[in-house]
Image: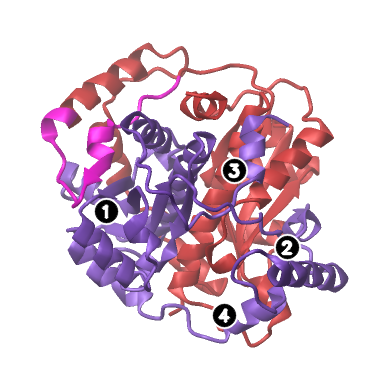
Chain colours: A red, B purple
Amino acid sequence: MNSTIEAILQHRSIRHFTEQKIEDEKLELILRCANAASSSSFMQCCSIIRVSLPDVRAKLAELAGGQTYVESASEFLVFCADFNRHQQIHPDAQLGFTEQTLIGAIDTGIMGQNALLAAESLGLGGVYIGGIRNNPQQVTELLGLPKHVLPLFGMCLGYSAKLPEVKPRLPLSIVVHQERYQNLDKQELEQYDQHIKMYYASRSRNNRQTSWSEQITATLNKESRPFMQGYIEGQGFSLK
Amino acid sequence: MNSTIEAILQHRSIRHFTEQKIEDEKLELILRCANAASSSSFMQCCSIIRVSLPDVRAKLAELAGGQTYVESASEFLVFCADFNRHQQIHPDAQLGFTEQTLIGAIDTGIMGQNALLAAESLGLGGVYIGGIRNNPQQVTELLGLPKHVLPLFGMCLGYSAKLPEVKPRLPLSIVVHQERYQNLDKQELEQYDQHIKMYYASRSRNNRQTSWSEQITATLNKESRPFMQGYIEGQGFSLK
């Protein structure tokens, strides 16, 4: 155990922030850490849009489904897959491959996690905002994103006002498979469902009565942002 | 600055390992850290396949394009987006959305980076292996991956035998945009190209003469795994 591992294991999403601003030198470290991330084939195909203007923040909070902390957090960063940079360098670049969508999403996730962990190690908290994918076209216009740039997630960062409980994850025995893919052990799932039910019922905020299986069943009864395919193709991704 | 940030900023891909095995308790911590990652809508849609059998490792090394360290590293983990788990729980789950491919790739990237950083904080080194996407169908068969599981990248972990130089990244002024997307500053790019040219010419191994612009131009003159779209659709991803 060491302080990095402690920070990772203590992760919880922070949605309530104090009014204290993140110091410039801390923000600089967070961004440098984001930028130090591994990069597939050294493509460096990620960009970060830092949004500070209050009216743009308010609009993004609304577009993300009324997530007010997008407006109130000290910092809000939008992480994008970015192959526009490459096209500026090489106008005839072969773009539009599904593989590049995967690289972009994976590498942007890696970069985001470097940023979040750096922030957490500095005593800050944060949360990923997938809600910017609710209205990707409007986000694209608001941030002036050209073709070949895909806004994948936002991140709120700031000083935590409230520290929620750590949410229990699926057991490692379900997530980690030895040699070959193993089907779910229904007994372990049942135990986990009981565990998460107790967590939801007893946590300090936003209590509810649900197991993980019930929760994902409800989520997957609905379509999952069915406009996304058309949107990303319009941005020049996943065309072939 | 703190030890987490130092570890992040000191990251370099490790491809040469000593014969020392990773201790069980360290591996357990690494996997727990992977599992503590943020999860979009708490879908928990990632799985890790730990491959230990030498003949499977040898085959994966070959499939990844002759990357011998896939065989020789103490640990080799394959990180997958996994919605099969959800389908086992809810056979009528609505799957196949492009949005789920994005969530899967982003969340698996986040999880991978937790694992790599945990390993680095424990004095280990590692490298992402995107090369498992060279032959995804064969990897799928080798690991017994069912539909709705997508092998996204591998990761070699072990004790570093050689510590290469840290590779200079694009400057933050290019990667981070304020408020709106900004086009490349060609002068900054030119400076970075000179910088990376010096790095490649002077590094201790695998010297070469190339700028970043030249490198990405060469990469993007070629198709990028054009079979990927058909493969992931066959696995039940990005169909709508």
Which label number is shown at residue A114? 3
The N terminus of chain B - image quarter? top right
Question: Would you say residue B200 sits in the magenta stretch?
Answer: no
Q: Secondary structure at mark 1?
A: loop
Determine whether the residue tagged by mark 4 lies in a helix, strand or loop: helix
Residue nearest the viewer, comparing A190 with B31: B31
The residue pinned by badge 4 equals B219
* Tag 2: amino acid: Gly
Read off the chain for label 2: A
Q: Respond whether the residues carrying marks 3 and 4 are from the same subunit.
A: no
Q: Tell me whether the residue at label 2 lies in contact with that at label 1, contact meaning CB atoms closer than 8 angstroms.
A: no
Q: Amino acid at mark 1?
A: Gln
Distance between mark 3 and mark 1 Cα atoms: 32 Å
Residue B87 lies left or right of residue A18; in this view the side is left
Distance between mark 3 and mark 4 Cα atoms: 26 Å
- Return the x and y of residue A210 as percentages of the image width and height: 28, 25
Residue B104 appears in the rendering: no
Label 2 to label 3: alpha-carbon separation: 25 Å
Residue interval drawn in magenta: A166-188
Q: Residue at x 19, y 63 (%)?
A: B142
**Classed neighbour count for the residue bearing mark 3: other residues with Cα under 10 Å, few (<14), some (14–19), many (≥20):** many
Mark 3 lies on a secondary structure that is helix
Residue highlighted by disc 2: A144
Residue B139 vertical placement versus A176 (above, below): below
Image x and y of residue A204, in percent: 46, 12
The residue lying toward the viewer, choosing from A130 and A119, is A119
Q: Label 4 amino acid?
A: Thr
Q: Upstream in the sequence, badge 2 or badge 3? A: 3
The crowding category of the residue bearing disc 4, from other C-alpha atoms within 10 Å (few below 14, some 14 to 19, many at least 20), is some
